[in-house]
Image (cartoon, rainbow, N blue to C red):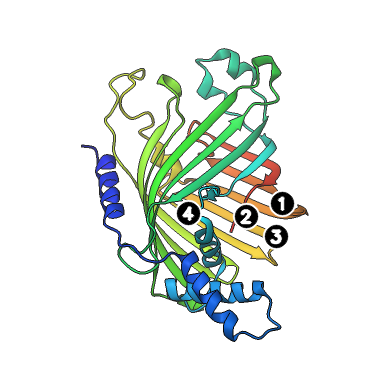
Amino acid sequence: MSKFALIILILCYLISSSPYAKTIEELTQECIFTTIKTADKKQTLQQVEDFCQQQVLEAELGQIEIGAISKRIMQERKSEFNPFVITPHKMNYILPATLTDNINAQAYSEVSEWAENFKDIEAKFQISMKVPLTTSGILKKGDHLYFAFTLESWWQVYTEDISRPFRETNYQPEFFYITPIDWHPLGGNAGVIVGVEHQSNGRSQLLSRSWNRVYLDFIFEKNNFALSFRPWYRLSEDIKEDALDPNGDDNPDINKYMGHFELGLVYSLSKRYDFSVKLRENFAQHNGAIEIGFTFPLWGKLKGYAQYFNGYGESLIDYNHKQQRFGIGFALTEIL
């Protein structure tokens, strides 16, 4: 049995052993009914609901001050078991136009028609969602187990000579466990995520790229600021005897370029503008990457999104390819 399969079995055991308790939504409704009886008649129902959401979250997660991540968790848990609601995981966005200074044509040398006709401008989008696997605490109050799936794609929509192919698509399923911890540095809140994930591009032979990782993510929040430090360990695979062998490691040197950790920072300004930074680094080879994101209001609930990337590993096919890319488009969900 592989390490990846063993970890999945352990996670499934945790799911089956979790006790039943009231959901966040049920606790909030009870608080609302109780508060309405004694509340000032000048208070609106929305004010009462906001008050109860904060009270329940503080009791559930044991926090001294509610930050941006906690508020998001609260909103998600109100509807995450609604069969008509899809809960976002990572950010969802569409960038109709992204421009790179160094398209990776070399990786497609075996598909000469593609490599010769790729354009530096293409579309990019990301769709990410998660599903809760537990309704209550597993090991402690406020913890939860999730399954998530993220799809990220780069689309050569402007290359009509080769029928506008999807140049690269990355698929990333994962299981993760999230729990608050009773530590409040600088008056903020902290939590830990432990997960296992698979990432691949769904290709075969020379274009195939994939890896499996276990990771530990330390989360810190204070007001509208959040920080994530996410080291990982790659699960080993068998060495390929031949490059065309469908079994074995497609990219044995991926850690040299993708590094061993990711540092993320997010800041929300007046709930209108969000700034994000992601950093990766391999200190031995000095390979890494930086991604900067910025959302801004357009009209109604629609937000614009600009993204800048510089370094290795924007996608799996580009894991050992360095480039700069800038794109602009629309944010379908908030960064925080």
Specify whether 101 is left or right of 35. Answer: right
**Which residue position holds label 1?**
303
Give the SS element for disc 1: strand
Type of amino acid under label 1:
Lys
Type of amino acid under label 2:
Glu
**Which residue position holds label 2?**
334
Specify whether 9 is left or right of 244. Answer: left
Neighbour class for label 3 at 10 Å: few (<14), some, many (≥20)? some
Looking at the picture, how far across and down is residue 252, in whole percent?
A: 35, 33
- Given residues 241 and 199, the one toward you in this image is 199
Q: For marks 1 and 4, give the CA distance.
A: 26 Å
Q: Nearer the viewer, mark 4 or mark 3?
A: 4
Which is nearer the N-term, disc 2 or disc 1? 1
Q: Nearer the viewer, mark 4 or mark 2?
A: 4
User: Image height check: is 216 above or below 34?
Assistant: above
Q: For marks 4 and 2, give the CA distance.
A: 20 Å
Q: Nearer the viewer, mark 1 or mark 4?
A: 4
Which is nearer the N-term, disc 1 or disc 3? 3
Q: For marks 2 and 1, give the CA distance.
A: 9 Å
**Which residue position holds label 4?**
81
Q: Residue 224 shows which numbered tag?
A: none
Contact flag, marks 2 and 3 (Cβ < 8 Å)? no
Determine which quarter of the picture holds residue 114.
top right
Type of amino acid under label 4:
Phe
Looking at the picture, how far across and down is residue 20, in whole percent?
A: 33, 62
